[in-house]
Image (cartoon, helix red, strand yellow):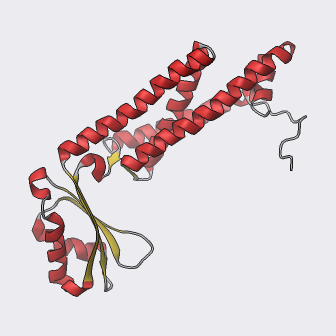
């Protein structure tokens, strides 16, 4: 089955101003969201604290659970529904390293006092100290930066420096749009998300190198048609 006909002509280069305008709007909206929210929303992996996943065997809600936990004086307490099952919740709290030990037990005891011990099922508990979270955050950022630097050297060696700069700008563009989307929709950044960012870099780089190869190949064959026509053709074939 042939999805793209050999004689099709799409003027990608001719639409570059429209694409640039759309990208600028998306980037500005994402940047504004990050500024308003004071930066990305970090998960337990990076911010440090306690995450407890619980299942309550009776109907309840986040407000009732926060009321049951108020005596623990948990800083930055957030209770939200989780998963597809009814009455399953994630409890997040920012606590100092000295408070982490035994926090999941205290949370379970507080909920058991309200709902009954047999009604509360502790399904998951994660605890990360602030120092460890800060270290993970720094290393996650450096992983992305090192990937960018490696790509810069590779494409400079494989093609030319100007091609490498274009590829890096495209990768930064993709990562920034994704980061802005996470901020806009209130999604947290944690270690799996850093892996997702690196995957975005990998897939974007793969597409970029394929197009670069096509441009180099087609430029020798269709040089007389002009560079814009060569780029348009290379993006399709």
Q: Is residue 180 visible?
A: no
In this picture, residue 89 sits left or right of residue 109: right
In this picture, residue 131 sits left or right of residue 147: left
Which image quadrant: the C terminus? top right
Viewer-nearest residue: 170 or 62: 170
Q: Position of residue 39 (x, y in %)?
A: 33, 41
Residue at the right extreme? 7
In this picture, residue 10 sits left or right of residue 91: right
Viewer-nearest residue: 186 or 215: 215
Question: At 46% across and 30% down in the image, what residue appears?
Answer: 147
Q: Position of residue 225 (x, y in %)?
A: 86, 17
Vertical placement of 230 versus 184: above or below? above
Question: At 32% across and 71% down in the image, what residue appears?
Answer: 89
Q: How many marks?
A: 0
In this picture, residue 71 sits left or right of residue 56: left
Vertical placement of 237 versus 47: above or below? above
Residue 142 falls in which quadrant of the image? top left
Question: At 51% across and 21% down in the image, what residue appears?
Answer: 152
Q: Position of residue 195 (x, y in %)?
A: 44, 44
Vertical placement of 156 versus 96: above or below? above
Residue 204 falls in which quadrant of the image? top right
Vertical placement of 15 versus 196: above or below? above
Q: Is residue 156 visible?
A: yes
Q: Position of residue 163 (x, y in %)?
A: 61, 18
């Amino acid at each position: 089955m042939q999805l793209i006909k050999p004689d099709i002509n799409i003027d990608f280069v001719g639409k570059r101003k429209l694409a640039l305008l759309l990208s600028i709007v998306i980037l500005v909206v994402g940047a504004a969201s990050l500024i308003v929210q004071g930066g990305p929303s970090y998960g337990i992996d990076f911010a440090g604290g306690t995450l407890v996943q619980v299942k309550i065997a009776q109907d309840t809600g986040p407000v009732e659970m926060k009321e049951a936990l108020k005596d623990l004086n948990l800083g930055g307490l957030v209770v939200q529904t989780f998963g597809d099952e009814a009455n399953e919740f994630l409890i997040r709290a920012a606590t100092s390293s000295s408070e982490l030990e035994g926090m999941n037990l205290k949370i379970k005891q507080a909920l058991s006092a309200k709902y009954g011990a047999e009604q509360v099922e502790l399904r998951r508990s994660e605890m990360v100290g602030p120092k460890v979270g800060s270290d993970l955050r720094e290393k996650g950022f450096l992983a992305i930066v090192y990937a960018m630097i490696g790509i810069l050297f590779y494409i400079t060696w494989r093609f030319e420096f100007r091609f490498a700069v274009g590829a890096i700008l495209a990768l930064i563009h993709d990562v920034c749009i994704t980061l802005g989307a996470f901020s806009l929709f209130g999604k947290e950044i944690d270690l799996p998300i850093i892996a997702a960012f690196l995957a975005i870099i990998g897939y974007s780089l793969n597409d970029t190198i394929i197009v670069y190869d096509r441009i180099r190949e087609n430029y020798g064959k269709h040089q007389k048609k002009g560079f814009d026509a060569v780029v348009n053709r290379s993006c399709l074939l």
